[in-house]
Structures are given as structure tokens and as C-alpha cells.
Image (spheres, rainbow, N blue to C red):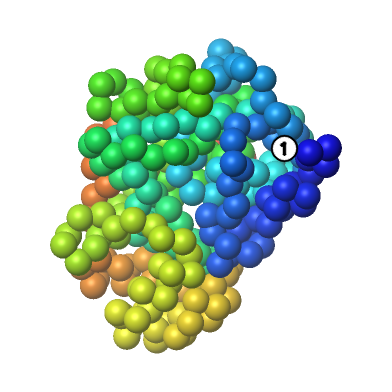
Amino acid sequence: MNDRTLEALGLARAPREFPLDYPGAWPATSGLLVGDRLLPLDDRVTYEDRTPVLAIGSNACPAQLRHKMAEFGIDSPVPMVKVRVTGVDIGVSAHVSRVGYVSASPVNSPGVVRELFVTWFDARQLAVVDASEGAYDRAWLTGPEFRFASESGESLRGAYVYVNRYGVLRDGTGVPRRHPGERALLTELLATSPELRKLFGRTPEEFCARASADRELCERGTRLFREEGLVTVSGLERFVRPQQTGSPGTGSSLPPPLM
């Protein structure tokens, strides 16, 4: 395919602009995000001068990454490497984002295997993404319980992941629930909580419209999750360190975008 633009590849809609699309469209395979194009990636799966970050939600959506970088005038390439990850699954963050959705969050899931993306950020890119993940702490996952294997079969030593400091939503059995996509998730949450409907309306469309950029309402919704006993731990909290060291770009110098 000669036209490698995100539009031509069906990857051009950012969840920040279309909340019900969350987590957005992911590529079918590894690629190099360059502006509004996703180019084929060479055989490299590691980049010694960059930091590997496992994408659980919209950070695997090229349009979302482009949107975040453009906010700070950054247009440098981002390698996106597709991997088979063992030990991590996609849960639901126990907070309402001001961009209008309830985002994904990693959960510890021994033995579970998922196909996800590792994004390799340089220092400036990492600072932008750190700043955009205001409800999360970045944690390093490595060791025998977590495995990261590329499409070529090469293993990565480990990767960072963003752990939600509010916890994650649980299912009816008390374990972390899995994120089914935004429309399905909001439909389920609204159907089971009259108080949530009072705050955000009866439909996913109403939820996103009311939540968008309304900090006070989003904070009330976040508190409601805990008040209704819907929150549990992700199991990854023990990997969060009080202060990130030895890695570039903590994001402290950047003002946080909408979260």
C-alpha cells in the first residue's frame, strides 16, 4: 500500500476528539509513526536510546499519539512494536477522564497472554506522555512473571506501564473487570448505577458530552465509583516507585494536558 497516511489506513480518529472510539484504532502490525503517516518498521525491536512503554489503551492508537505530541509541537518518529505480553491484561481505570471517557488500565493477570504494543519514546516524547497520564504512575515490569516477545520472537527485558493510582473497576465477582470498548463499558456502567445516570445521563453519548472538560463532574464520578464499592486494586501497585530514576523524561517540566 503506497498511501501510508493514518487516514488511508483507517487510523486517523483520536479518542480525545471522539471519546466513544476509545481506545481508538490500533495498527495491525508494528510501525513507525512519523507525523500523520505510519511507515513499515525495520527489524529492530529495541532502541537503546529510547524508553519502552507498554500501551494498554489509547497510547496504541497512532492518532492519539499524534494528537498528544502535536499539543507540544513534537513531530519526531515513534516506533510502535507489536508484542505478545504475558502477565498483563486490560482493565478499567477507576476514574472518569476529562476528555470524556473511562480509560483502560493495566491489571496483573498471571499467565494471560495479550497482543499489545510497546511504544519507544525519546526523552521529549516520554515527557509529553507522562504529563498526559496525570492519573497514573509509571512502573517498570520485568522478571519471570512478565514476558514481552516481539513478532519475530525476540524477547524484551521489560517495559514501563502506567498504573492508575485510583485503582481499577471490579466485576461482579470482585476481580478487575476487562475493558470491552468505551460504548459497551459506559452502557454497562450506566445500566447498573442510578447515581451514575443522575450525573452523566442515560446514554454513552450523554456521558461523554457531560464529562468532557468538566473537572468537577469527573471528580464526582470518580468518587462515586469508590462510594458504590466498584473499585479494587490492579495488582501492579507494588511495582510503582515513589520517584522515577534512571530514565529520561518524567514530564515534570510540562503542564498536564486534559486527562
Residue 79 image offset from top left, x and y in percent: 63, 28
Front-lying residue, 44 or 216:
44
Q: Secondary structure at mark 1?
A: strand
Question: Where's the N terminus, which quadrant?
Answer: top right
Judge left or right: residue 2 versus residue 234.
right
User: How many labels, in total?
Assistant: 1
87 shown above or below 180: above
Residue shown at the point (29%, 39%) measured from the top left? 112
11 shown above or below 139: below
Residue shown at the point (60%, 52%) measured from the top left? 25
Please name the amino acid that badge 1 sits on.
Answer: Leu
Residue 175 image offset from top left, x and y in percent: 20, 55
214 shown above or below 61: below
Name the quadrant containing residue 69. top right
Residue 134 shows in this picture: no
Name the quadrant containing residue 84. top left
Judge left or right: residue 150 versus residue 179.
right
**Residue under pointer 1:** 38
Residue shown at the point (78%, 49%) measured from the top left? 8
Residue 151 shows in this picture: yes
Residue 30 image offset from top left, x and y in percent: 60, 32
Residue that sits furthest to the right in the current view: 2
Residue 204 image offset from top left, x and y in percent: 50, 76
Residue shown at the point (83%, 41%) measured from the top left? 3
Q: Neighbour class for label 1 at 10 Å: few (<14), some, many (≥20)?
A: many
